[in-house]
Image (cartoon, grey):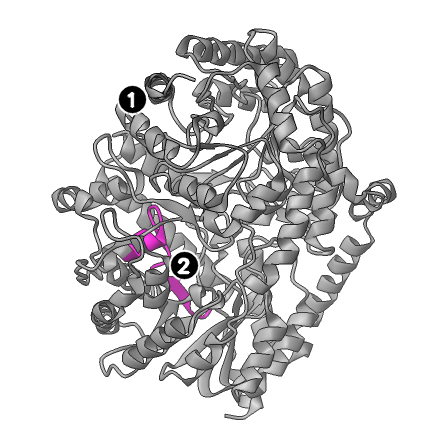
Amino acid sequence: MTSESAAAAAQPTVYGYPRQGRHRELKKAIEGYWKGRVDADGLRTAAAGLRRANWQQLAGAGIHEVPTGDFSYYDHVLDTTVMVGAIPDRHRAAVDADALDGYFAMARGTQDVAPLEMTKWFDTNYHYLVPELGPDTVFTADSTKQVAELTEALALGLTARPVLVGPVTYLLLAKPAPGVAPDFEPLTLLDRLLPVYAEVLADLRAAGAGWVQLDEPALVQDRTAAELNAAARAYRDLGALTDRPRLLVASYFDRLGDALPVLAKAPVDGLALDFTEAAAANLDALAAVGGLPGKRLVAGVVNGRNIWVNDLEKSLSVLGTLLGLAGRVDVAASCSLLHVPLDAAAERDIEPQILRWLAFARQKTAEVVTLAKGLAQGRDTITAELAANRADLASRAASPITHDPAVRARAAAVTEADARRFPPYGERASAQRHHLGLPLLPTTTIGSFPQTAELRTARADLRSGRIDTAGYEERVKAEIREVISFQEKAGLDVLVHGEAERNDMVQYFAEQLTGYLATQHGWVQSYGTRYVRPPILAGDISRPEPMTVRWTTYAQSLTSRPVKGMLTGPVTMLAWSFVRDDQPLGDTARQVALALRDEVNDLEAAGTSVIQVDEPALRETLPLRSADRPAYLAWATESFRLSTSGVRPDTQIHTHMCYAEFGDIVQAIDDLDADVISLEAARSHMQVARELAAHGYPREAGPGVYDIHSPRVPSAEEAAGLLRTGLRAIPAERLWVNPDCGLKTRGWPETRASLENLVSAARTVRGELPAS
């Protein structure tokens, strides 16, 4: 095929779309089902309506081939576990009794059965449910969901492409099931899994699929020769099937590296590559293997993870280069649009000119369509779009929002000593123990307490003007009084004020810092029915005035026990925002760190002796390729230390991380030089405690004994058992007792019961310790 005919064939597509609906209808339907207000048929009807609306919106915008199968009640990796029949033994009875309830039991657990472990999807803030596999796992195909959703789309007269998690990525994301040797490698099950994928592919072909997309993002990570050979074998076998649709193997989030020639040689019909995060590397690698002659290339040239308007001229240049490297070049976003909000046009509080800098899912869809038109029909057909795009890019570059000379001068003046705390930890620990007077195995929580309906109503009433600021603040104070009173009665040692005034752990701070924009409708799925509104980090950052001091000080006035000041760290402020892309991330992190340093110092000056600076996103933002990690970890750990190094030795600095694979960053955790770190550990059975011990971590740690992402209440004995496991790795004088994460999403009844059991467990195990 000539370059001209390849251009003429160019079509726009996307890999996935936000699931929640314009008003988070899916969240409301699912939570209604959990509470018994919506029956199963009502939930299915609501979900079908959202799928139909998504497909029709995409088709109406000009998308040639809509994705199916990307829609999920909870998580697409969990959907894959159901598709291949890898149901854990402990959930089998629930799934057999009722497939829908069993599905949610795997996701959330029940009072009697623990859920699947949850962790981050590569370097995003989306969480997936980790498959549990072992040498005895038997896979069986269940293509019901995938076939049904394809059939729905085809019935609307649409061209549709089912999207599946690929078999190699599925196995590489899995972990050994409970009771299985920890060194078991799920990838050894590949030959057992491939026939199941073959059956699903045959079912989809029979249902009318012309193409099926198999997502293999795990191949953009560093992979061993054995893992690359497994990928080659997988796609040799799947490509050799006679009863299958055409296969499009998709990767995203980074460069494919050594996996690109493996997939290019495989007998599949097309590849989808990311040309935003790794444009130059993937271009060079594709040229080096001689391109994809006679095959389809889907070029992800619109960033599917950030919200800035695309540089159309730049993307067209990349697409033009690709024309000679494939039999057909189609245009797409770089990954599923699941990671961005639905529609920027819904925002009414952002200044119109600034709004033109932003592209959410619908705007990105339009960009994909525009680029495909320009590629297929020539630039002259999109002259007006190109001119408007140039004006928007120029407006952003010239805006005073993006450049504050005072902020830049302060950041430039930072020295290495500013990011070092003195004296060393051993001397600080002695001063802190004397100052705080805490028992062995001190108990605390991570920070937030349940956000009640009354609090949410009060916040909405303040926004609408139904109550004034004074009335709202009285409601917040009442909540703080209740939280402090409960913690004292429960017997916790280090208290928190509960964060009643906060809408979100990032947005709350973003709304008080210069350089940030807040959205009203920019919801993005984090996990299950948990949606967040990431703020937009648009310009240089500073802190005009204290953000948390008065609330922390008020809480401390109610008790003689220490109350932690609670802040969100600089890396997490970046990771859980849509961050500016016009300067290095390290520069932006330093600006945020200096703003937080001011807050930390003000908290200490107001009498706060324990200050927690949360960094749950430190591991999440770790680059997928090991070669890129040292530079990232250097600025990430420096920014944390810059935030926290201006306090006295007897002020105790805590940090917190959750729902990530911590083994990759134990040295970085050490480099933070925090006095205490609390980490998720309940679902992983204290794995992180063992990892800290193996590293020789010298400071205090609180591996969680209460999984707050499940509604189940752990018994005191269960928490005590986890605590005893933690003590085998961390000595009692350095071990804290706490939940995995904040309690914002939980209800008060389960929170009370769980924390009372946690304190009881600490007292029990404390009594088992040898007398000093």
The answer to whether one can see residue 535 in this image is no
Quarter where residue 443 is shown: top left
Q: Which residue occupies 35% across, 54% down? A: 76
Residue at x 28%, y 45% (from the top left corner): 45
Magenta stretch containing residue 76, yes or no?
A: yes
Can you give x and y, in whole percent of width and height, for residue 548 in the image? Answer: 65, 22
Q: Quadrant of the C terminus?
A: top left
How far from the left and from the top, in percent, is residue 319?
A: 60, 77
Reading the image, the residue beneath label 1 is 716
Residue that extends furthest to the front in the rendered view of this protein: 772
Q: Nearer the viewer, residue 656 or 350?
A: 656
Assign a secondary structure to mark 1.
helix
Mark 2 = which residue? 55
Nearer to the camera, 700 or 83: 700
Q: Is residue 296 left or right of residue 106?
A: right
In this view of the protein, can residue 119 be seen by the observer?
yes
Q: Which residues are magenta?
A: 63-80
Disc 2 residue crowd, few under 14, some 14–19, many 20+, Cα 10 Å: many
| Residue count near mark 1 (Cα–Cα under 10 Å), binned few <14, some 14–19, many ≥20 | many
* Type of the residue with mark 2: Trp
Instruction: Check disc 2 and report its element: helix, strand or loop.
Output: helix
